[in-house]
Image (tube, coloured by chain):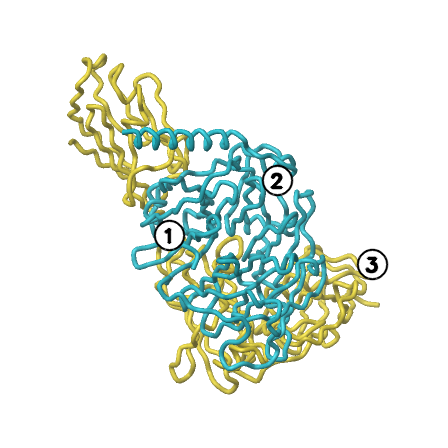
Chain colours: A yellow, B cyan
Amino acid sequence: MARLSANTVRIGIPVLAIFLGAAPARSQSPSLAWKPDGSDPSVGRFEARGLPEGSPPLAQPGRFLTVGVEAGPGLLGTWGSEGNTAWFRPRFPLAPGVRHTVRLGGGLSIELVHSLPVPETPATVVVSSHPSSREIPENILRFYLVFSAPMRTGEAYKRVTLVRDDGHIAELPFLELDEELWDPTGTRLTLLIDPGRIKRGVKPLVDIGPVFESGRRYTLKVDAAWPDANGKPLSKAHQREYQVVPPVRRRIDPGDWVPSPPMSAAQPVEIRFPRPLDKALAERLIRVSDDENRPLAGKAEMLAGETVLRFTPRAPWQPGRYHLAAELALEDPAGNRQDRLFDSPEDEEPGPAKTRCGPSFRVGSR
Amino acid sequence: MLRDWLRNMMFAGALAGAVSMAGALRAGPLTDSLKSGEVKLQSTGPITFGPEGVLFVGDPKAAAVYAIGTGDAAASKAAPVNIENLGGKLAALLGTKEADVQVNDIAVNPESNKVYLSVSRGKGPGAIPVILSVGTGGELKEVALASVPHAKAELSKPVAEGAKRMEAITGLKVVKDKLFVAGLSNEEFASTLRKIALPFDGKTASAGIQIYHGAHGKYETAAPVRTFTTVEINGKEEILAAYTCTPLVRIPVSELQDGAKVKGKTVAELGNRNRPLDILVYSKEGKPFALMANSARGVMKVGLDNIESVDAISARVADTAGLKYETLKQHVGVEHLAKLGDAHAVMLVRGTAGVSLKTIELP
């Protein structure tokens, strides 16, 4: 069997084809090729060109034009023929790095191997990890890892470890879900500590103990071998060391927040919290409104170990009074909210209000 | 000779019966409510069947559940399905490497006893969602979604462009004319169980129900339901939910009203260092049982016959308490379970050679 090899570049080696049917109507030799529909090289069809009229692959392309990958034959797709060309259109775009073997039978014994190269991308890194504070409470619930590019799913719980200062690796520390908690871009991962190891009195905490012990140091480690969505490992491992302090079991009180009003129309406002808040939730759920209770559009960013929120309004400040408010869903890194503690049954009865008010501040002269 | 002839006649008769049944597709209010068109899945997570051959597909990326009329509503006898090297076969079909195939869930259509698979091609935000059915001979076939009767229920308002909040869908189950959806957000720790009326009425699902359960004198606040199923106790439907700290909790469906805070009753503690993965209920020799796949202990068979009388667990127990269970150690690596007919279960099993589908007789 003659074998054509192609990697995006087709090699135009003449093929010795033996056709046991009628004599070819044209002098053109049968050949196989991948033909993209447009600029996307992964979408298109495999073509068997220059086929003699009446040849079996033209009459029955589904039988005589077959495509398989390393995992086996039988790639899903549709077949057809027109003129002297029989074709196979894969159901899905070609996956980069997968070798497609195309075979033409029916007396025309030709083979083409085609694979899309894996795109050249810069190595992915861990951009940040949160909390970014030096200290975390023993009852911490949530960590975030932010990557520079989309990551491969199904790896998180084996690639992230929590190591105590004596080298002990925490046993099953995370709430493991079939579907890991990624953001839509696949670049931010949420890791929840198993709530059973946090909530007072529940069995895993009583029997195994908490994941973190106050007074000890722990390191959150991200394995460099974790592949990104293109299959390339991280450029380097990531780690962040934490000193664990006693558990936080206090509700969030926006009344404790201290805004530093902007000194000019272009400056952001900075809101200082007495203790760290959850980065994602604070950036999404803390609102700055004008005196007529209209929320301002702008960019919110947590700083200083998640103890300061910097809010930059899209439009410059107008002189006047502004108000801070937070939706009830706001949490601190231990999952405590304004209306309840993470592990307390003593919830407030839910009221109609979805937000609570914080302090106000003034921009410009009175 | 005569015996052979009789046998052939009987076979032909059985075949004719099967064909005539296949012709009688059962339509009903659910299928009547579906509109034909393309289902553009953004992702695929848990799947489950309702009546009339309607498949419910959880699409976490779209924050939605689709009801899809498969047209596969012809009654057919349950036949065991066993596929070795399922991962490799899916990879060949979908044109990728075995390591890049993820089977997210399995479901059996109770009308046709056909097995369906929820699969992702790729492992990243660009993964392609695919639904496949398994033929009686083990052949895998894509469920075409280009033009199919369907309806969509949104779980939350579509998130703004660039937003990072998403919700994982951890379970789906139909109870009569309601679909229950368990989910967990990647931001706030709000584990919600949503109740969606069937047929879908086009509205966004309710705000969700918070479930508490007693454990050791404490009430768990908003613990995430890891997997759940439904069971009928004394003629009343109840949810049987497994939590990450592995208690089994029963919650009467009638109490699950929108926005309610419901106290579930802990009926079993199944020990530590273990995560529940999937659960089904069945009846054998007149007695009800639950079969639960776990991360660490093989499959657990839990007797439910005294679920009504067992005391709610509210005090600390040595290791396990409440309903009695046995561990079926021969079934290791089971990630998903689905009931096949009355007497069998299909399991997605992960072994050293990848994933496979295996049918067992219900123990």
Q: Which subunit holds the residue at mark 2?
A: B
Q: Is residue A260 left or right of residue B73?
A: right
As drawn, A93 above or below B322: above
Residue ID at (51%, 66%): B303
Residue A145 location (% of width, % of height): 49, 65
Q: Say what secondary structure mark 1 lies in.
A: strand
Closer mark to the observer between disc 3 and disc 2: 2
Q: Which residue is mark 3?
A: A292
Residue B44 on image: x %, y %: 50, 48
What amino acid is labelled 3 in the image? Glu
Q: Mark 3 or mark 1: which is in front?
A: 1
Asked whether residue A159 appears in the rendered view, the answer is: no
Residue at the spot of label 1 = B358
Question: What chain does badge 1 belong to?
Answer: B
Residue beneath disc 2: B151
Q: Is residue B299 above or below residue B354?
A: below
Mark 2 or mark 1: whose residue is earlier in sequence: 2
Q: Are marks 2 and 1 in contact (CB under 8 Å)?
A: no
